[in-house]
Amino acid sequence: MAPTVCLFATWLVARLVGLLGVEAVGDWQSSLRVGVAAMFVLTGLAHFGPARRDMIAMVPPRLPRAPLLVTVTGVLELAGAVGLLVPATSTAAGICLALLLVVMFPANVHAARSGGEFRGRPATPLGVRTVLQLVFLAAVLASTA
């Protein structure tokens, strides 16, 4: 839930700042880009903090070297967030982040089906995870269109 709140709250704040005259976030798309970037900074940093153990457990067992995969995806999320904020790379970063969301979705499926916990709470059900993933995907694509 934190990524969703981060995405929409940051988008709203950036949009309000844009309405106050800050040209860099002067339209809905550029302010959405800031929201998406903030969300990926949040989720990217989570790959290295207290949630790391739970993220490693989310990786389907058929995939090798789960800790390395969590590290790589965290780095990619952080790099993508920075790339979204650089005009010359924002479109490429958005496409890469959209692909990353698709590639990481099996980990969400595994987490939902395994019945495990994430940071001490029951795993989010698959239906909710799917809807959230589609919202994130739509936000990434809309921010770079």
Image (cartoon, helix red, strand yellow):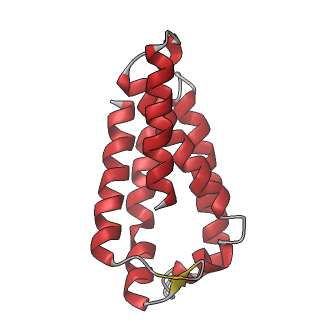
Q: Where is residue 33 in the image (x, y as percent from the top left)?
A: 46, 33
The residue at the point 37 percent across, 26 percent down is 29
Could you tell me residue 107's position as x and y percent?
45, 75
Give the residue displayed 40% in from the left and 53% down from the top.
99
**Above or below — where is 48 with respect to 134?**
below
Task: Name the residue located 30 percent from the left edge and 56 percent from the top edge.
Answer: 134
Q: Quadrant of residue 140?
A: top left
How many callouts does the rendering have? 0
Q: Is residue 145 left or right of residue 110?
A: left
Where is 69 relative to 80, above or below? below
Inspect this view and state whether residue 92 appears: no
Q: Is residue 17 left or right of residue 79?
A: left
Q: Nearer the viewer, residue 30 or 76?
A: 30
Of residues 106 and 51, the one nearer the viewer is 51
Between 102 and 134, the one nearer to me in the picture = 134
What residue lies at 48% left-to-right and 83% top-to-bottom?
Answer: 60
